[in-house]
Amino acid sequence: MQALSLHMSKTAMGASQKDFESAMNQVKLLKKDPGNEVKLKLYALYKQTTEGPCNTPRPGVFDLINKAKWDAWNALGNLPKETARQNYVDLVSDLSSSDSSSQVKPEADRKQPGYETLVVTSEDSITKIMMNRPAKKNALTIQMYREIMLALEAASKDDSTIIVLTGNGDYYSSGNDLMNFMNIPPGEMEKEAKNGAILLRDFVGCFIDFPKPLVAVINGPAIGISVTILGLFDLVYASDRATFHTPFTHLGQSPEGCSSYTFPKIMGQAKAAEMLMFGKKLTAREACAQGLVTEVFPDSTFQKEVWTRLKAYSKLPRNTLHISKQSIRNLEKEKLHAVNAEENSVLQERWLSDECINAVMSFLSRKAKL
Ligand SMILES: CCCCC/C=C/CC(=O)SCCNC(=O)CCNC(=O)[C@H](O)C(C)(C)COP(=O)(O)OP(=O)(O)OC[C@H]1O[C@@H](n2cnc3c(N)ncnc32)[C@H](O)[C@@H]1OP(=O)(O)O
């Protein structure tokens, strides 16, 4: 896509309003995501054509996506509307021919830039967010929580139909990175616990509010928070190598990710207590029998079968799918946010307890593993 450049009008007469409208329709039919840079160009040309030069205030520094859009539009300066329309039509024409002629690119070429702990790709109307710390079993660092939130925020606004969270390597995720509890200066424990609880509230809040179908592709063992948030997903597909483990009591911690509410609802009080209070590790088949997992696949064919299924689902009518998701979720949103707030305030205290500090120190000093 980088090679695509805006060039002079291909049609001597200039593009008409009808050409412009037909180009807008063509954009929706592109099979491959053209990437953020090209999408920004399209956005800018569309705005310049329909509204003329940008004269709105620049969005604030934290509004990353709208700021990037504003910058792209503003960069067109006083480009006349007719020229912008022509450039839009020409760009779409280039994209359409490249879309139909080019081969599928390797994942490295489709990777969205800007993430250090994730690999985020979009293809076939599916945005895949892959946790990418395989050497650390995809343990979630503070940066990773933040990047997942950013990736979800971007995916909620991109043109994908389905969003997938998965892990790279042999683990899905080993949960919270216990190093997050390290290097806290003396006297700062309470402040750090409070900051951690705020980050966790926002992280879980993104899953509660996420507007599109969210699918977990569980490629291997899952621990802690990577398990508890599964109650907020729409589909959970698991390899038969996956396990599901929430060893909170062993770690001096308490359930989060709204699991204190979603797990009893999904699997019943007694099974939820066995997992969340007593730390029972479930196999993928057990988790499926208890309703936490949608379907289990043999590990040898897991990726092939799951992605074939998801590609078929991604062709379903997009808006209807999103509306259905929202009407299912909206009934529960208020309750889920209240549960999230309550769980985090309990956890904030737990993090300061001797039981929690001792458990983390045991792991870090190599005395204990799950
Ligand atoms: C903002 C804060 C929000 C907080 C939200 C709270 C969430 C609660 C939870 O998520 S609780 C769950 C916490 N997770 C754990 O307790 C898992 C700890 N890890 C283990 O027990 C083991 O590592 C294992 C069972 C996952 C894997 O064992 P294995 O022997 O197969 O592999 P290694 O132990 O050698 O692991 C390879 C390297 O990865 C490091 N690592 C793995 N998991 C974590 C982790 N959760 N935190 C920190 N580091 C982790 C491990 O230390 C090895 O590193 P090394 O190669 O440098 O030694």
Image (cartoon, rainbow, N blue to C red):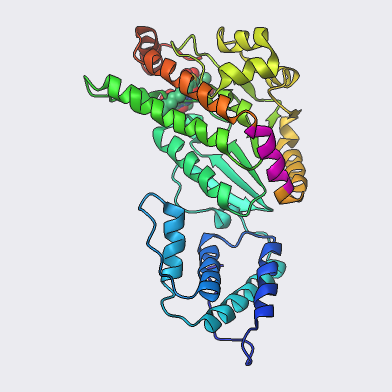
Residue at the (45%, 12%) spot, across then down = 251
Residue at the (48%, 75%) spot, across then down = 52
Magenta segment: 320-330
Q: What is the x, y in percent for residue 109?
A: 56, 58
When the figure is inspected, residue 133 is found, relative to residue 343, above or below; the finding is below
Side (left or right) of 355 relative to 330: left
The answer to whether residue 198 is magenta is no
Screen quadrant of the N terminus? bottom right
Residue at the (46%, 23%) spot, across then down = 341
Side (left or right) of 4 relative to 357: right
Query: Residue 128 occupies which quadrant of the picture?
Result: top right
Side (left or right) of 274 relative to 69: right
Q: What is the x, y in percent for residue 318?
A: 71, 50
When the figure is inspected, residue 209 is found, relative to residue 277, above or below; the finding is below
When the figure is inspected, residue 222 is found, relative to residue 280, above or below; the finding is below
**207 or 109: nearer the viewer:** 207
